[in-house]
Amino acid sequence: MNTQKHLTLEARTTIELELSKASSFKRIALLLNKDCTTISKEVRLHRIFEKTGAYGKAFNDCIHSFNHNCNLRCVCHRCDFKKRPCWSCGKCAESCISYKKYICPQLSKPPYVCNACHNRNKCCLEKAFYKASYAQREYEIVRSESRSGSAISEKELKHLDSVISPLLINGQSLHHIAISNLDKIMKSERTLYTYINNGLFTARNIDMPRTVRMRPRKGKPKAMKIDKQCRIGRTYDDYKRYIEEHPDVSARQIDTVEGIKGGAVLLTIYFVKQELQLAFLRPSNDSQSVIDIFEKLYIEMRPDIFVDIFPLLLADNGSEFSNPKAIEYDKQGNLRSKMFYCNPNAPYEKPNCENNHEMIRRIIPKGVDIGKYTQQDVDLMMSHINSYARKSLGNKSPYEVFSFQYGEEILNIFNLKMIPANEIILTPKLLG
């Protein structure tokens, strides 16, 4: 048996070639000197789904279309324009009240993919493929994320902080705290030192009595990912594919605006087509505060309106956005939005949101503590910014364009109001 635990690109290429030959998992496992369950897990974990049609047929995974018993016509404007049956369209399935997704039963049993399927050129259902290059990229992302940050949930971290930090500040040593609170902490002393040295607690290593008082080295703090596999299926390439499949869906770009390090921050949400930007005050730059804001909007706007306003979110790779499932799904498990990530160190992939931050910086310059403002101050600032006319909108303001498309009631939920043109202030004296 091969003692190498991780599959290589060459091994994954062999898997892809053998799957195209309809080889069994047992045969592939013998070729690679692996267990057959390893091959099965690899294929299921890294298969890629594609919504492609067949020659002369559009993609359509509706069960009524598959069974050839769909008689509907002109459900969407495409079918209405060409006067054709909806089963031949493939674009209006999800908007049809009779739509019911049909999944090929062959994908629920080995080999779980369509690599060697003889009918795939005639099939209009969603297909699954194993591709070595794609599987290798996903594996490298998981490997990188699993080796970064700390393997601890945000709730558990807050509990440990509430126990350890007050005692450290009172002058107790970490060893004394660890042995005196075993039932509450349940972590080794070495692990607690790691958390403190990485700056995860309110108390710092400088608060420990016998820590050598050295000038701290300047370095980028380690961000803690809540879900280390959050980027799988949500990369920028996945985002572009989703946009191609859903051309009518518009993304909302989300980001964070900082004031001073460790202080309050703003969550910004930018509507690209309308150029409207929202800002919400957060006491700290953690993922729970982002989740709380979307939960609040979900309740205030009602689920049907929320799904229409926030169908698609594009974020950077900040740790505050590393729990996408809590944003994508409500507490009952219903899908309410889709979330994707830009590539690392690529803010140019959501330039609209980044550029509009310049308007915020005119009023709240860099280095100013955002915590001294209230949400009412932030709403006033965004009202002035969104009332500012843009040449790209035909000399209309984002407020006017958004109000025309979605109605002023939604803007009232966002606590925005229209500011007369000559009363707009885009300097620090607005919140002075």
Image (cartoon, grey):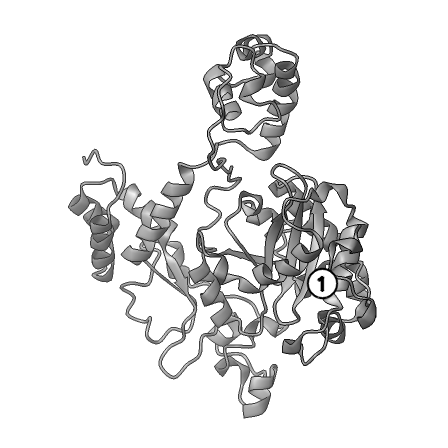
In the picture, measured across the screen, residue 105 lies left or right of residue 391, that is: left
Percent coordinates x, y for residue 321 in the rendering:
56, 47
Quick check: 274 above or below 233?
A: below
**Image quarter hosting the N terminus:** top left
Q: Which residue is mark 1?
A: 304
Disc 1 marks a residue whose amino acid type is Asp
Quick check: 127 above or below 215?
A: below
**Which residue occupies 48% across, 71% down?**
244
Rendering quarter of residue 37: top left
Percent coordinates x, y for residue 342 in the rendering:
48, 56
In the picture, measured across the screen, residue 389 lies left or right of residue 183, that is: right
53, 193: nearer the viewer: 193
Q: Could you classify mark 1 by the number of other residues whose Cα lies within 10 Å: few (under 14), some (14-19), or many (20 or more)?
A: few
**Which residue occupies 29% across, 42% down?**
38
Rendering quarter of residue 306: bottom right
Q: Is residue 254 visible?
A: yes
155, 203: nearer the viewer: 203
**Which residue occupies 49% across, 14% down?**
212
Q: Is residue 312 visible?
A: no
Quick check: 257 above or below 263?
A: below
Rendering quarter of residue 368: top right
